[in-house]
Image (cartoon, rainbow, N blue to C red):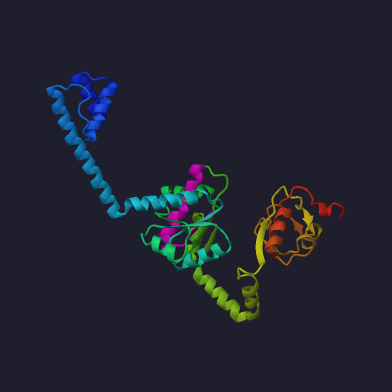
């Protein structure tokens, strides 16, 4: 269009609007004819413009058909729809690499209504997503910055890497921590990784993983616990591991500004207010106190291990994170 417009202006002194119009009807070969007398040179230029326009149009159609045959355009449209879904997520988990662990982890996340995105570089991820009900997924290299941007990592709560290869997990953890620094995020991600051996567990923790799960170690611990205390394992299976059971156990961090700091455990009246029990306290230095007595002091940045209903634990979190003494305890 630009070349045609300039050609008509320079060769036959067309006005700018006439030149644009003549180029348009010539380029699209609609056959409206000449809007003004055209010289011999102008007619040769018009023929050249028609042939060039036909060649460009044919090439464009060929490229479009080739891309449709390869499925690239369809894939781009699918990814675009997926990116719109991801953009609406907040406090989700980015689960990297599909395998048997991913299937079970995503099943639990789905049952607990925790949003997640599954990323895997293999093209089979589309089939796996349908088979194992991954509502949101991406085909990409998880450690690449573009994949992290597509997964909306800036709004995510954390990342779970479940690759069978220790090298993949190392690369991903390093990339995530670098992503944090480059984008100046207000809080660090909670990174969970899988590892086959205990030596791998130590490596991944040193590189920045918050929690490293070793399936081999967990299996051994569970089997030995079942052998030594079968009744206790049955109890845990019944009340903690089943998603339909309302009983839950969580650690609650005591912030520096909490009204409960430097108060005795019995003075907080957690049991009476929330119907939850504190079964353990982890001090700031890492020392753990199991089944603490009422005279134990609650220090800032310590962690309370609380057991109770999900609603009760939520109320306990609100209670501990409050700056002022709750109304229920004003006259206690």
Q: Check the picture and name the quadrant holding the N terminus.
A: top left
Residue displayed at 22% across by 39% down: 56
Residue displayed at 48% across by 47% down: 179
Between 312 and 82, which is closer to the camera in this rendering? Answer: 82
Q: Where is residue 183 in the image (x, y as percent from the top left)?
A: 50, 43
Give the farthest residue toward the left: 40
User: Magenta part of the protein: which range?
Assistant: 158-183
Q: Check the picture and name the quadrant holding the C terminus.
A: bottom right
Q: Does the magenta stretch include residue 229?
A: no
Residue displayed at 22% across by 31% down: 32
Query: In the image, is 52 to the left or to the right of 204?
Result: left
Give the farthest residue toward the front: 32
Between 49 and 211, which is closer to the camera in this rendering? Answer: 49
Query: In the image, is 15 to the left or to the right of 255?
Result: left
Q: Where is residue 256 in the image (x, y as percent from the top left)?
A: 70, 48
Tell me if I can see residue 282 in this picture.
no
Q: Where is residue 309 in the image (x, y as percent from the top left)?
A: 69, 65
Query: In the image, is 161 to the left or to the right of 321?
Result: left
Q: Where is residue 8 in the image (x, y as percent from the top left)?
A: 21, 23
Give the vertical position of 108 relative to 185 (above or below).
below
Give the vertical position of 224 relative to 152 (above or below).
below
Between 115 and 175, which is closer to the camera in this rendering? Answer: 115
């Amino acid at each position: 269009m630009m070349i045609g417009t300039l050609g008509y202006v320079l060769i036959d002194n067309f006005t700018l609007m006439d030149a644009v119009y003549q180029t348009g009807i010539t380029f699209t070969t609609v056959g409206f004819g000449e809007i003004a007398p055209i010289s011999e040179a102008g007619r040769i230029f018009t023929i050249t413009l028609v042939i060039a326009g036909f060649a460009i149009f044919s090439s464009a159609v060929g490229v479009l058909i080739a891309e449709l045959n390869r499925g690239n355009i369809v894939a781009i449209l699918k990814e675009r729809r997926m990116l719109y879904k991801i953009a609406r997520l907040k406090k989700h988990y980015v689960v990297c690499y599909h395998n048997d662990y991913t299937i079970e982890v995503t099943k639990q996340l789905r049952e607990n209504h925790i949003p997640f995105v599954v990323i895997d570089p293999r093209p089979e991820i589309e089939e796996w997503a349908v088979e194992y009900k991954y509502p949101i997924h991406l085909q990409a290299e998880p450690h690449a910055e573009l994949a992290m941007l597509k997964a909306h990592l800036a709004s995510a709560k954390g990342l779970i890497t479940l690759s069978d290869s220790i090298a993949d997990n190392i690369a991903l953890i390093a990339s995530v921590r670098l992503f944090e620094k480059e984008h100046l995020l207000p809080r660090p991600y909670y990174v969970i990784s899988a590892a086959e051996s205990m030596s791998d567990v130590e490596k991944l923790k040193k590189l920045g993983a918050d929690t490293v799960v070793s399936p081999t170690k967990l299996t051994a611990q569970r089997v030995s616990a079942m052998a030594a205390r079968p009744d206790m394992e049955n109890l845990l299976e019944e009340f903690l591991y089943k998603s339909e059971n309302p009983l839950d156990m969580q650690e609650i961090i005591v912030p520096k500004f909490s009204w409960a700091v430097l108060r005795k455990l019995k003075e907080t009246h957690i049991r009476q207010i929330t119907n939850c029990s504190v079964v353990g306290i982890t001090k700031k230095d890492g020392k753990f106190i199991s089944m603490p007595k009422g005279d134990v002091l609650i220090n800032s940045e310590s962690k309370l291990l609380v057991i109770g209903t999900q609603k009760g634990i939520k109320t306990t979190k609100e209670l501990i994170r409050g700056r002022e003494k709750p109304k229920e305890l004003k006259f206690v």
